[in-house]
Amino acid sequence: MLEWAFIVLQLALTAIITGGVVYYFLGIIAARKLVKKRPENFFAHNLSISILKPLKGVETGLEKYLESFYNLDYPTYELIFAVHIANDPAVEVVNRLRARYPKVKARLVIAENPPYANAKVFSLEQMASVAQYDILVITDSDTSVSKDYLNAIATAFQSERVGAVTNLYRGVSANDFWSKLEALGMSTEFMSGVIVAEWLEGMKFTLGPSMAIRKSNLAQIGGFAAMADFLADDFVLGNWVAEKGADVVLSTHVINHHATSPGFLQSFKHRLRWNRSTRFSRPSGYIGQGFTYGLSWALLGAFLLPFPWGLVIFLVTLLVRFWLALEVGVRVLADKTVFRNLWLVPIQDLISFASWIGGFLGSEILWRNRRFRIVAGGRFIPVETK
């Protein structure tokens, strides 16, 4: 009986590994198709754009990241920053940049006493209420961009059918080992999933580092207030726009998402928070996500499948995984660090696999030094501590 159970386990494991390899090949094909449809040039439009920047505290590199938004080559845009308290350290950074670039229209909003579980959403609501222009661009504080960033977004909004736009991004690390792993995961794992999803079913979500929406489409989905109790506000924004029948576009213009979690523990908590949020937001999709961890399953197969086939399967899976990392990280995202950090991919994937399993093992997260519980549909509520 135990022998038959072990055989069934081996067959199931082989099927899962096969599914993982198929997924890797889908990622390779999707990456090549995406490169082919990338426009040769982005050009300025007459769309006026408001950039909304919610801030909280000062992470390493913040001033440099924010400064990239002051150097955009675009005719008409404004920058709106928001903090929750007037003495937030980020205010000093904003004031220095406003003084350094007086010709760039910028303002600061104090979004005091946020009543929402997602305080960031309250900041977005307050900034949107004073935004002058019809296109709202929301970017995270740990994002930096090149000069033609808004030209790319404006190009994507050429059709009136487009309600929201989001961007590809590459992970950019600090010098420590754990941020390198996190950035590598962004460039070679997470972006692979985004590219495959875009190819197979079209964009049904947006990505937090950069999401843009027309005010009319925002009003149609209930405004930012409708997202007050959702942790994954980026996912629901794009998802709701798509559900209302408007197009969500994945811009092929690549921006930088800086990995800022110091050390293994903070990095893993960040991954765990994202996974638990995804599990409650898209339960079936989260289970399907297991097939994207082909290399981790193949490593298990190297021990459980008959020798030498288990080892052969692992090596083949490893080569295809490396191929996917190069196609997405280097060809699509132009991430120059991927090739030299390629040897770290198996370690990155194992940590990501562990955090995916961890996503099944609880519903609580720690976010901005507060503990929350995620409930059905992706909403989250504060956990009262004694």
Image (cartoon, rainbow, N blue to C red):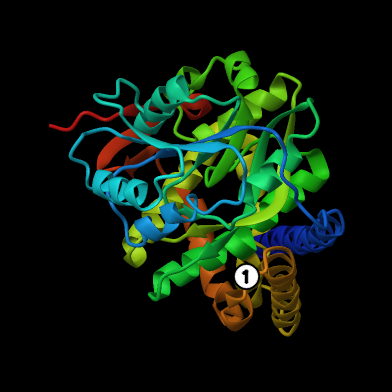
Q: Is residue 180 above or below residue 276?
A: below
Side of 322 where 358 appears, left or right: left
Does the image show residue 2? no
Q: Is residue 324 left or right of residue 96?
A: right
Residue placed farthest to the front in the image?
Answer: 103
Question: Quarter of the image containing the N terminus?
Answer: bottom right
Residue 40 at x, y = what percent? 82, 58
Compared with 30, 234 (above or below) is above
Image location (x, y in percent) of residue 284: 64, 36
Q: Nearer the viewer, residue 327 or 154?
A: 154
At label 1, which amino acid type do we have?
A: Asp
Q: Is residue 27 left or right of residue 130?
A: right
Front residue of this view, candidates 309 and 211:
211
What secondary structure is found at the residue carrying circle 1? Answer: loop
Q: Residue at x 36, y 56 (%)?
A: 62
Where residue 196 appears, x then y in whole percent?
A: 75, 51
From the image, tell me which residue sits under label 1: 335
